[in-house]
Protein backbone atom coordinates (compact mmCIF):
# COMPACT_ATOMS: atom_id res chain seq x y z
CA UNK A 1 0.00 0.00 0.00
CA UNK A 2 2.76 2.45 0.98
CA UNK A 3 4.62 1.62 -2.24
CA UNK A 4 1.52 2.42 -4.32
CA UNK A 5 1.03 5.70 -2.46
CA UNK A 6 4.63 6.68 -3.15
CA UNK A 7 4.21 5.92 -6.86
CA UNK A 8 1.09 8.08 -6.94
CA UNK A 9 2.93 10.90 -5.22
CA UNK A 10 5.83 10.71 -7.70
CA UNK A 11 3.36 10.73 -10.58
CA UNK A 12 1.67 13.89 -9.27
CA UNK A 13 5.04 15.61 -8.78
CA UNK A 14 6.06 14.74 -12.33
CA UNK A 15 2.72 15.90 -13.69
CA UNK A 16 3.07 19.24 -11.91
CA UNK A 17 6.55 19.74 -13.35
CA UNK A 18 5.32 18.79 -16.81
CA UNK A 19 2.55 21.38 -16.64
CA UNK A 20 4.90 24.13 -15.36
CA UNK A 21 2.85 24.42 -12.17
CA UNK A 22 5.70 23.55 -9.85
CA UNK A 23 5.90 24.31 -6.15
CA UNK A 24 7.92 27.48 -6.70
CA UNK A 25 5.04 29.02 -8.65
CA UNK A 26 2.55 28.61 -5.84
CA UNK A 27 2.01 31.59 -3.52
CA UNK A 28 3.97 31.11 -0.32
CA UNK A 29 1.86 31.23 2.83
CA UNK A 30 2.03 29.61 6.25
CA UNK A 31 -0.79 28.91 8.69
CA UNK A 32 0.44 31.08 11.59
CA UNK A 33 1.04 34.13 9.41
CA UNK A 34 -0.97 36.37 11.76
CA UNK A 35 1.80 36.20 14.42
CA UNK A 36 4.75 36.86 12.10
CA UNK A 37 4.06 38.66 8.82
CA UNK A 38 7.64 39.80 8.15
CA UNK A 39 8.36 37.04 5.57
CA UNK A 40 5.31 38.21 3.59
CA UNK A 41 5.70 41.95 4.19
CA UNK A 42 8.96 43.14 5.83
CA UNK A 43 7.31 46.49 6.61
CA UNK A 44 5.56 44.58 9.42
CA UNK A 45 8.87 44.37 11.30
CA UNK A 46 8.56 48.00 12.42
CA UNK A 47 5.53 47.13 14.57
CA UNK A 48 7.90 45.66 17.14
CA UNK A 49 10.45 47.83 18.96
CA UNK A 50 12.33 44.70 20.06
CA UNK A 51 14.88 42.62 18.21
CA UNK A 52 13.59 39.17 17.32
CA UNK A 53 14.30 35.84 15.65
CA UNK A 54 11.60 33.51 14.35
CA UNK A 55 11.62 29.99 12.93
CA UNK A 56 8.82 28.08 11.22
CA UNK A 57 8.77 24.39 10.31
CA UNK A 58 6.01 22.89 8.13
CA UNK A 59 5.48 19.28 7.09
CA UNK A 60 2.77 17.69 4.94
CA UNK A 61 1.88 14.02 4.46
CA UNK A 62 4.09 12.85 7.33
CA UNK A 63 5.55 9.41 6.68
CA UNK A 64 5.62 9.72 2.87
CA UNK A 65 9.00 10.25 1.17
CA UNK A 66 9.19 13.42 -0.88
CA UNK A 67 6.25 15.08 0.89
CA UNK A 68 6.30 18.90 1.00
CA UNK A 69 8.33 20.45 3.80
CA UNK A 70 9.29 24.04 4.58
CA UNK A 71 11.81 25.71 6.87
CA UNK A 72 11.58 29.48 7.35
CA UNK A 73 13.80 31.82 9.35
CA UNK A 74 13.51 35.56 9.82
CA UNK A 75 15.07 38.01 12.23
CA UNK A 76 15.28 41.76 12.62
CA UNK A 77 16.83 44.44 14.81
CA UNK A 78 15.45 47.95 15.38
CA UNK A 79 17.44 51.05 14.45
CA UNK A 80 15.83 53.69 16.71
CA UNK A 81 17.90 56.60 15.36
CA UNK A 82 16.36 56.03 11.92
CA UNK A 83 12.90 54.78 13.02
CA UNK A 84 13.80 51.68 11.07
CA UNK A 85 14.49 47.96 11.22
CA UNK A 86 16.88 45.74 9.29
CA UNK A 87 16.86 41.98 9.01
CA UNK A 88 17.14 38.74 7.12
CA UNK A 89 14.66 36.19 5.72
CA UNK A 90 15.68 32.67 4.66
CA UNK A 91 13.38 30.02 3.18
CA UNK A 92 13.89 26.42 2.09
CA UNK A 93 10.97 24.64 0.44
CA UNK A 94 11.10 21.01 -0.72
CA UNK A 95 8.61 18.87 -2.61
CA UNK A 96 9.71 15.60 -4.15
CA UNK A 97 12.46 16.36 -6.66
CA UNK A 98 12.05 20.13 -6.23
CA UNK A 99 14.07 22.37 -3.93
CA UNK A 100 13.64 26.14 -3.59
CA UNK A 101 15.98 28.27 -1.48
CA UNK A 102 15.56 32.01 -0.91
CA UNK A 103 17.68 34.44 1.10
CA UNK A 104 16.72 38.11 1.37
CA UNK A 105 17.98 41.03 3.42
CA UNK A 106 15.49 43.82 4.14
CA UNK A 107 15.26 47.37 5.42
CA UNK A 108 12.03 48.98 6.68
CA UNK A 109 11.32 52.53 7.81
CA UNK A 110 8.27 53.95 9.58
CA UNK A 111 6.80 57.44 9.57
CA UNK A 112 4.50 58.64 12.36
CA UNK A 113 1.21 59.97 11.02
CA UNK A 114 -0.58 60.68 14.32
CA UNK A 115 -0.32 59.90 18.01
CA UNK A 116 -1.02 56.20 17.35
CA UNK A 117 -0.78 55.65 13.58
CA UNK A 118 2.28 54.85 11.47
CA UNK A 119 3.08 54.23 7.82
CA UNK A 120 5.90 51.79 7.15
CA UNK A 121 7.64 50.96 3.88
CA UNK A 122 10.19 48.24 3.16
CA UNK A 123 12.57 47.01 0.50
CA UNK A 124 14.18 43.59 0.35
CA UNK A 125 16.79 42.12 -1.97
CA UNK A 126 18.46 38.74 -2.34
CA UNK A 127 18.41 35.63 -4.51
CA UNK A 128 16.35 32.54 -5.25
CA UNK A 129 17.77 29.17 -6.24
CA UNK A 130 15.45 26.59 -7.77
CA UNK A 131 16.50 22.99 -8.44
CA UNK A 132 14.64 20.02 -9.90
CA UNK A 133 16.30 16.60 -10.04
CA UNK A 134 14.09 14.87 -12.60
CA UNK A 135 16.15 11.68 -12.71
CA UNK A 136 15.59 11.05 -9.00
CA UNK A 137 11.89 10.37 -9.66
CA UNK A 138 12.70 7.16 -11.53
CA UNK A 139 16.15 6.77 -13.19
CA UNK A 140 14.89 3.77 -15.20
CA UNK A 141 11.91 5.57 -16.71
CA UNK A 142 12.72 7.54 -19.93
CA UNK A 143 9.88 9.94 -19.08
CA UNK A 144 12.06 11.31 -16.27
CA UNK A 145 15.38 10.98 -18.10
CA UNK A 146 15.87 14.64 -18.96
CA UNK A 147 18.05 17.55 -17.99
CA UNK A 148 17.91 18.68 -14.37
CA UNK A 149 17.07 22.28 -13.51
CA UNK A 150 19.35 24.54 -11.46
CA UNK A 151 18.55 28.24 -11.67
CA UNK A 152 19.67 31.14 -9.47
CA UNK A 153 18.09 34.55 -10.00
CA UNK A 154 18.22 37.90 -8.23
CA UNK A 155 15.17 38.98 -6.23
CA UNK A 156 13.71 42.34 -5.20
CA UNK A 157 10.66 43.11 -3.04
CA UNK A 158 8.60 46.03 -1.77
CA UNK A 159 6.10 46.42 1.05
CA UNK A 160 3.83 49.07 2.58
CA UNK A 161 1.92 48.86 5.87
CA UNK A 162 -0.39 51.21 7.76
CA UNK A 163 -0.80 50.34 11.41
CA UNK A 164 -1.80 51.54 14.86
CA UNK A 165 -1.98 50.17 18.38
CA UNK A 166 -4.72 47.66 17.50
CA UNK A 167 -4.68 47.13 13.71
CA UNK A 168 -2.58 46.78 10.59
CA UNK A 169 -3.24 46.64 6.86
CA UNK A 170 -0.60 46.18 4.20
CA UNK A 171 0.26 45.32 0.61
CA UNK A 172 3.49 43.78 -0.60
CA UNK A 173 5.36 42.19 -3.47
CA UNK A 174 8.19 40.39 -1.63
CA UNK A 175 9.35 38.25 -4.56
CA UNK A 176 9.74 40.27 -7.73
CA UNK A 177 12.18 38.08 -9.64
CA UNK A 178 14.30 40.42 -11.75
CA UNK A 179 14.62 37.83 -14.51
CA UNK A 180 10.86 38.04 -15.06
CA UNK A 181 10.67 41.79 -15.70
CA UNK A 182 9.36 42.42 -19.20
CA UNK A 183 8.34 38.80 -19.77
CA UNK A 184 4.91 37.23 -19.93
CA UNK A 185 3.71 34.77 -17.30
CA UNK A 186 3.96 32.00 -19.90
CA UNK A 187 7.69 32.66 -20.33
CA UNK A 188 8.35 32.46 -16.58
CA UNK A 189 8.50 28.69 -16.21
CA UNK A 190 9.82 28.46 -12.65
CA UNK A 191 9.03 31.72 -10.85
CA UNK A 192 5.95 33.86 -10.52
CA UNK A 193 5.51 37.18 -8.76
CA UNK A 194 2.99 37.12 -5.92
CA UNK A 195 1.10 40.09 -4.47
CA UNK A 196 -0.10 40.01 -0.88
CA UNK A 197 -2.85 41.90 0.92
CA UNK A 198 -2.87 41.53 4.71
CA UNK A 199 -4.85 42.92 7.62
CA UNK A 200 -5.69 42.31 11.28
CA UNK A 201 -7.58 43.94 14.14
CA UNK A 202 -7.05 43.37 17.87
CA UNK A 203 -10.07 43.98 20.11
CA UNK A 204 -10.32 43.73 23.89
CA UNK A 205 -13.23 41.69 25.28
CA UNK A 206 -12.54 42.56 28.91
CA UNK A 207 -9.57 42.32 31.28
CA UNK A 208 -8.79 38.68 30.44
CA UNK A 209 -9.73 38.22 26.78
CA UNK A 210 -8.79 39.68 23.40
CA UNK A 211 -9.77 38.61 19.90
CA UNK A 212 -7.82 39.09 16.67
CA UNK A 213 -9.38 38.45 13.26
CA UNK A 214 -6.82 38.48 10.42
CA UNK A 215 -6.68 37.91 6.67
CA UNK A 216 -3.99 37.22 4.08
CA UNK A 217 -4.74 37.22 0.34
CA UNK A 218 -2.13 36.01 -2.17
CA UNK A 219 -2.46 36.62 -5.92
CA UNK A 220 0.02 35.24 -8.46
CA UNK A 221 -1.61 36.31 -11.72
CA UNK A 222 -4.26 34.88 -14.00
CA UNK A 223 -2.60 31.45 -14.26
CA UNK A 224 -3.38 30.65 -10.61
CA UNK A 225 -6.48 31.46 -8.54
CA UNK A 226 -6.16 33.96 -5.70
CA UNK A 227 -5.71 32.27 -2.33
CA UNK A 228 -7.06 33.68 0.93
CA UNK A 229 -6.39 32.76 4.56
CA UNK A 230 -8.99 33.95 7.08
CA UNK A 231 -8.32 33.45 10.77
CA UNK A 232 -9.56 34.39 14.23
CA UNK A 233 -7.56 34.05 17.44
CA UNK A 234 -8.85 34.33 21.01
CA UNK A 235 -6.22 35.35 23.58
CA UNK A 236 -6.65 34.43 27.25
CA UNK A 237 -4.80 36.63 29.76
CA UNK A 238 -2.25 37.48 27.03
CA UNK A 239 -0.73 34.02 27.62
CA UNK A 240 -2.67 31.50 25.53
CA UNK A 241 -4.01 31.95 22.02
CA UNK A 242 -6.60 29.61 20.49
CA UNK A 243 -7.34 30.13 16.83
CA UNK A 244 -8.88 28.74 13.68
CA UNK A 245 -7.82 29.40 10.09
CA UNK A 246 -9.67 28.76 6.84
CA UNK A 247 -7.85 28.67 3.51
CA UNK A 248 -9.82 28.93 0.29
CA UNK A 249 -8.27 25.74 -1.08
CA UNK A 250 -10.73 24.01 1.29
CA UNK A 251 -8.36 23.65 4.23
CA UNK A 252 -9.06 24.34 7.90
CA UNK A 253 -6.50 24.62 10.71
CA UNK A 254 -6.57 24.75 14.48
CA UNK A 255 -3.90 26.98 16.04
CA UNK A 256 -2.43 27.00 19.55
CA UNK A 257 -0.12 29.80 20.74
CA UNK A 258 1.67 30.02 24.07
CA UNK A 259 3.31 33.24 25.25
CA UNK A 260 5.73 31.90 27.84
CA UNK A 261 6.79 35.47 28.64
CA UNK A 262 7.41 38.66 26.67
CA UNK A 263 10.51 37.02 25.18
CA UNK A 264 9.36 33.60 24.00
CA UNK A 265 6.36 32.51 21.96
CA UNK A 266 5.57 28.97 20.83
CA UNK A 267 2.97 28.02 18.26
CA UNK A 268 1.51 24.84 16.79
CA UNK A 269 -1.08 24.34 14.06
CA UNK A 270 -2.75 21.33 12.48
CA UNK A 271 -4.24 21.92 9.05
CA UNK A 272 -6.43 19.46 7.17
CA UNK A 273 -8.45 19.32 4.00
CA UNK A 274 -12.22 19.60 4.36
CA UNK A 275 -12.69 17.08 1.55
CA UNK A 276 -11.10 13.82 0.48
CA UNK A 277 -7.72 14.43 -1.08
CA UNK A 278 -7.21 13.17 -4.62
CA UNK A 279 -4.41 10.68 -3.89
CA UNK A 280 -6.31 7.52 -3.05
CA UNK A 281 -8.31 9.12 -0.26
CA UNK A 282 -5.31 10.50 1.65
CA UNK A 283 -6.22 13.54 3.71
CA UNK A 284 -3.87 16.44 3.02
CA UNK A 285 -2.76 17.31 6.55
CA UNK A 286 -0.07 19.84 7.45
CA UNK A 287 1.58 20.31 10.82
CA UNK A 288 3.42 23.53 11.60
CA UNK A 289 5.58 24.59 14.55
CA UNK A 290 6.76 28.14 15.23
CA UNK A 291 9.16 29.55 17.79
CA UNK A 292 9.88 33.23 18.36
CA UNK A 293 12.38 34.93 20.62
CA UNK A 294 12.35 38.68 21.32
CA UNK A 295 15.08 40.53 23.14
CA UNK A 296 15.86 44.07 24.19
CA UNK A 297 15.13 46.51 27.00
CA UNK A 298 11.65 46.98 28.52
CA UNK A 299 9.88 44.40 26.41
CA UNK A 300 6.11 44.71 26.21
CA UNK A 301 3.55 42.06 25.33
CA UNK A 302 3.03 41.74 21.56
CA UNK A 303 -0.19 40.17 20.30
CA UNK A 304 -0.62 42.12 17.05
Image: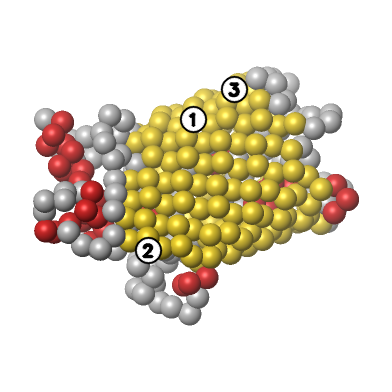
Question: Residue at the location (48% across, 65% down)?
Answer: 153
Mark whose residue sits in front, 3 or 2: 2
Residue at (53% x, 59% y) in the render:
127
Q: In the image, residue 297 lies at what x, y percent?
A: 84, 31
Q: Residues within 10 Å of mark 3 (few under 14, many from 20)?
A: some
Give the residue displayed 49% in from the left and 58% down from the top. Answer: 128
On the image, numbered disc 2 is attached to which residue?
190
> Mark 3 and mark 1 in contact (Cβ < 8 Å)?
no
Disc 3 to disc 2, C-alpha distance: 38 Å
- Vertical relation: 260 (above or below) 183: above
Q: In the depicted view, which residue is nearer to us: 295 or 161? A: 295
The quarter in which the C terminus is drawn is: top right
Q: Which mark identifies residue 14?
A: none
Q: Quadrant of residue 157?
A: bottom right
Q: Alpha-carbon distance for marks 1 and 3?
A: 12 Å
Q: SS class of the residue under badge 2?
A: loop
The answer to whether residue 108 is seen in the rendering is yes
**Closest to the observer: 13 or 142?**
142
Q: Which numbered mark, 1 or 3, is in the foreground of this view? A: 1
Earlier sequence position, callout 1 versus callout 3: 3
Which circle marks residue 258 in the picture?
3
Q: Residue 232: x, y in percent?
A: 54, 35
Q: Which x, y percent locates residue 256?
A: 52, 25
Amino acid sequence: MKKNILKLLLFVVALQIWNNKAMAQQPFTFTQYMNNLTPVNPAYSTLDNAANVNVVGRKQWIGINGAPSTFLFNGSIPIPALNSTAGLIALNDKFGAENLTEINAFFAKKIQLSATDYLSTSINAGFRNYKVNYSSLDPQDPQFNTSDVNQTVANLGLGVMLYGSNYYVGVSLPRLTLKNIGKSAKENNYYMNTYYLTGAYLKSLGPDFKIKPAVLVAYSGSNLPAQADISTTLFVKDVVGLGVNYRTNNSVAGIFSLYINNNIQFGYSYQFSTGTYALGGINNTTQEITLSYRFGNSLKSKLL
